[in-house]
Image (cartoon, rainbow, N blue to C red):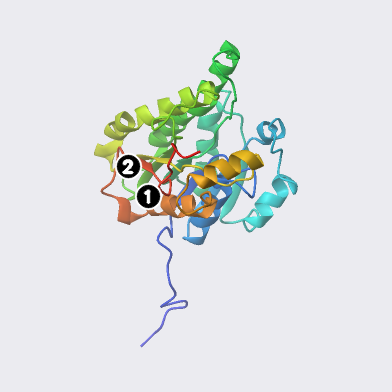
Amino acid sequence: MIVEENAGAQRGPLDGRVAVVTGVSRRAGIGFAVARELLTAGAKVLVQSWTPHDADQAWGSDPAGMSGVLDALGGLGDRLAHVQADFADPLQPARVIEEAGERFGHVDVLVANHARSSAQSLEQLTATELDLSWAVNARGSVLLTQAFAAQHDDRRPGGRVILFTSGQHLAPMPLELPYAISKGAIHQMTASLSDALVDRGITVNTVNPGPVDTGWARPELARQVGNALPAGRWGRPEEVARLVRWLASDEAAWITGQVINSEGGFRRWVK
């Protein structure tokens, strides 16, 4: 009997698949955890980042820089590629998908995890910020989906689109109106995008990860939200990543058009 080399070795659930994961710029972030989980599951991954957004926020850029983020994912090579892209530019979503196709030959999975954060109340609201949040969060997700669908080879199994919303459909977010409104659009587009692609064997689902500890919350908010979570803690990025990995796998092939709330029983009414 001839035994092939590596025969019997365990194969990951995403072996042979290629994924694009957006919003990968901080080791503490959800995007980083998702990219790491998909790599561990056997996928090849192109990650997108836009570090100037982090630099403008209170949490700041990753201390190790983007090179440190990529090194922590195993480094650029046969299974990992990276592109910087600002989704405020409507041409960039298609460029990201094209880069992945050129680098790895095809794309099977799109995880649109990127987000522009914006803390503006009704009194502070500006048209500029509304337009920018819409462009990055909602329009960017639609254009990524469009570009993914245009290049997807339907002869390949496992076409997956996984979008991200927030908790705006479960409780008001009056201090983050541009963010909440744009994330609400993603919630509402899920069923329609799913119907547009289901006949091609491509599923479209959206994840609401609930409060996740990515290092952005101030101590008082962290304590208050932690009290409202039955586990007494915030969600962890790796918990979100495991859900995404499952949605990207063959096991989730029968699920499409759904917004999945993964919040650990978040009791918003508890102060």
Q: Secondary structure at mark 1?
A: helix
- Residue 217 shows up from this direction: no
Relative depth, front residue between 48 and 7? 48
Task: Check disc 2 and report the residue beneath it.
Answer: 203
- Residue 123 shows up from this direction: yes
**Amino acid bearing label 2:** Thr
Residue 186: x percent and y percent? 41, 29
Residue 71: x percent and y percent? 68, 55
Residue 37: x percent and y percent? 51, 56
Image quarter where the N terminus lies is: bottom left
Q: Residue at x 42, y 33 (%)?
A: 145
**Foreground mark, 2 or 1?**
1
Say whether marks 2 and 1 touch (CB < 8 Å).
yes
The label on residue 89 is none
The label on residue 247 is 1
Q: Name which of mark 2 and mark 1 comes first in the sequence.
A: 2
Residue 69 is left or right of residue 158, and the answer is: right
**Amino acid bearing label 1:** Leu
